[in-house]
Image (cartoon, rainbow, N blue to C red):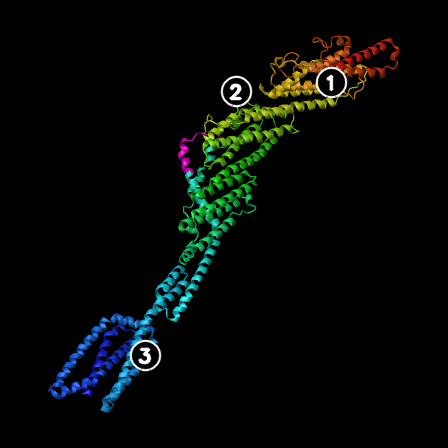
Amino acid sequence: MSAYCRKSRARTRPASDQRFAEVHMDTVMDNWFVSAVLVYSVLLAVVLSCQRGSDMRREEERNRSVYDDQPNAHKRFMEKLDARIRNHDREIEKMCNFHHQGFVDAITELLKVRADAEKLMGQVTDTNRRLQDAGREVRYAAAFVNAFAVTAQTEEVIRCRVQQRNMATTVEKLQLCIPVLEMYSKLKEQLESKRYYAALKTMEQLENIYIPRVSKYRFCQIMAETLPKLREEIKEISMSDLKDFLESIRKHSDKIGETAMRQAQQHRTFTSAVQKQANLGCAKPLYSLNGRTSLQHNGLAAEETVDEEEADDEVLTVQDLVDFSPVYRCLHIYTILGDRETFENYYRKQRKKQARLVLQPQSNMHETVEGYRKYFNQIVGFFVVEDHILHATQGLVTRAFTDELWNMALSKIIAVLRTHSSYCNDPDLVLELKNLIVIFADTLQSYGFSVNRLFDLLFEIRDQYNETLLKKWALVFREIFELDNYSPIPVENEVEYKLVVSRFPFHDAEIEKQPFPKKLPMSQSVPQIYIQVKEFIYASLKFSESLHRSSTEIDDMLRKSTNLLLTRTLSGCLQNLIRKPHIGLTELVQIIINTTHLEQACKYLEDFITNITNVSPETIHTTRLYGLSTFKDARHAAEGEIYTKLNQKIDEFIQLADYEWSMVESDGRASGYLMDLINFLRSTFQVFTHLPNNTNDHAAMSHLFHIGRILSRDSRTEVFVSKAAIFSVFSKSQGKVAQTACMSACKHLATSMMQMLLDTELKQVSMGAIQQFNLDVIQCELFASSEPVPGFQGDTLQLAFIDLRQLLDLFMVWDWSTYLADYGQPTSKYLRVNPSTALALLEKMKDTSKKNNIFSQFRKNDRDKQKLIETVVKQLRSLVNGMSQHS
């Protein structure tokens, strides 16, 4: 029976093994997997064998009773056995189908413990072999050793059960450890691929989920000790990336700022072009200058607008120029690590340092506009990055921090610009600097920064710009004056006349009626100065654009700057020109004519400014141009210089006088120097006929009052004639420069001749010399009576020589009795002769009589004359002493 059972078991096991192999053979594709299946089958067979070994004796007894007690029992047993085998096969198949996926997962896990499985397979095989041997020994052993064999077999079964349990425990623990190892491997891969944020998340999962499950194993402890070091390593790496980022943006700030400012400029240009296009239909016709209009000066030309429209439409943002991932990554890493505050403080501190570096200008920045542009680009790039960080991150930088940083930077920027702009002497460079500041301010204002102080700075720079313009135009005016020929402008035909009139607003009905060729009264410098004043207004207007100011404020700026040009620059150039030694009387006369026409053109300049700014001249608080006072002052200076130069020329002729003061008789004709002087005066006064009348000329009036005061002074009481009397004398010549100059010249000539006669170095004067001097005075009186300048009434001009005439008549007639008798009377014939003057000249004649007439004392007539002279001298001295005591 036992043999049959063994045969049955032998037949059953191969059948089940074969069935098991057929079910799973389709899923096994390599020998390794087949080996695993075989191992699993052997384990199953061993388990079944162990289960059958324990019931072997009961089965043998049951079989023996079946064979011994019942007929045909063998056949029925075999049928039941086959049915049972089929039932087991179905159960095995169902079990295999149910556990197929688990089996596949188990096989996958068993692959990782292949070495232990192979070792275990060897042990199981050995155990199975020994169990088989034991079974065979049990079957053939005697009854007395049956108990001992069962005991040994039981121990083997127990040992196998322990091993089975250990295997299950091992598999379970391996299932717990494998995810930890997989996560750690994943962590390493993330670190190698620089995915630090994901690596930190993996570390967090390892610490909180996986490692606590297997924390008792040593490799987990080592792993847990490694994780903090990895975190520090990640912090160091991310911080290193941040430092590289900060260095990178410091280098690329120039490019970032350039892009931002270019976009702001394009936007402002587009907006301005749209506004000007909208206002083009209602624009007023403006004065043109060389084909230009103020509209072209105020805005962009059509070509410039087209160029802007054809510009590259690609709009680059700061994200396109800078990779901000290092900042985001470092911020997230420090946030996860709970050290965000440290990162924020470090970032802000570094950015403050970079801000200070960016705000440091180059020493030669003021030399070129590129230096300013690079400086602005770096600052704009810095704050564009900060603005992006402000909006892209939460709390890394705050609005308060950026405002504090901007206020610090703004103070430094203003100080730098104020210092470096003061070195700029080129108005074009100052204008480009202004345009850069406007674009700079507009760019930062679009990012939310306050720029009001920058526009306040522009007003300071505007004053400096005006100063540089004034210096530039001072050179222009000097060059115009140096190249001028100071002669009227000749025009040969209508074309030339219209050309001059188009450049300068000149209208004269009398000159227009004259035939060609003809001459215009002003010289070439007048239209050139007028054009340059308009050019100055255009240049000043360029700075006023884009300052966000109203038309009234711009109009006020233009008028103030134009007033500075007229009152300081042009006036100073005219004053310097008038005082130059090489400027003669003819040039001074032409300068007076020029200033008169420039003064008349001031109203056209006011209209010109009004048309540019579209501000009505009736507007309240509108500044007026001070050109009238400027040109009047210049004209007064020129007139005064005419008087001065004319007197200097008279002095030069006087220095040529060579009188023989001891001559007995005169030559019978006037001195040569005097005739030359009179001829010079005649030709000079003919030039003065071109001067315009100026009835309000204060300088000429002051000269007239001065001369009239001298002419009307009484010799004894110094009683002055009233101003009304002077006005009546010069009623027709009031304010005329030519008349004033003529009167001044005659009076200066008379005074110089009087000084020559009374010179203290002249010790002796003969009667012949007095007669010769009288002939010269007669020529002066003839010149005065010939009316060298029209407009004098009666003998007004001859009054300049009245002092000389009365003094010479007194000595020529020798009418001392009349002089002494009528002295002090208003009707005195010699009212203009001062006793001290008569005494000085008489003493000179007394000394001459003593020297030349040594033997005349023996003649009675000479003795009487000498006594008379001594008597007159005594009386004159008493009069002089009396005047001294009275005074």
In the displayed orientation, state which residue is furthest to the left.
71
Q: Which residue is mark 1?
A: 754
Instruction: Indicate whether 256 appears above or below 662.
Output: below
Which percent across, then down, holds residue 96? 23, 73
Between 653 and 517, the residue placed more toward the observer is 653
Amino acid type, callout 1: Met
The earlier-in-sequence mark between 2 and 3 is 3
According to the picture, the residue beneath numbered tag 3 turns out to be 120
User: What x and y, as percent, mark residue 121?
Assistant: 31, 79
Q: Does residue 603 appear in the picture of this structure?
A: yes
Q: Nearer the viewer, residue 665 or 841?
A: 841
User: Which residue is at a point 65% across and 22% down the rendered structure image?
Assistant: 643
- Name the residue type under label 2: Ala
Of the residues shown, which amino acid type is indicated by label 3?
Leu
Instruction: Indicate the quadrant where residue 746 lies.
Output: top right
The N terminus sits in image quarter: bottom left
Label 1 to label 2: alpha-carbon separation: 48 Å
Segment colored magenta: 272-288
| Residue at mark 2 | 509
Residue 671 is covered by the magenta coloring: no
Q: What's the distance in space between the residues labelled 2 and 3, CA to CA?
A: 134 Å
Q: Are marks 1 and 2 in contact (CB under 8 Å)?
A: no
Name the residue: 79% across, 22% down.
Answer: 761
Asked if 135 appears above or below 697 in the picture, the reply is below
Q: Quadrant of residue 223?
A: bottom left
The one nearer the camera, 670 or 805, is 805
Secondary structure under badge 2?
A: helix
- Residue 711 point in image, percent of width and height: 67, 15
- 72 shown above or below 649: below
Q: Marks 2 and 3: CB-CB under 8 Å? A: no
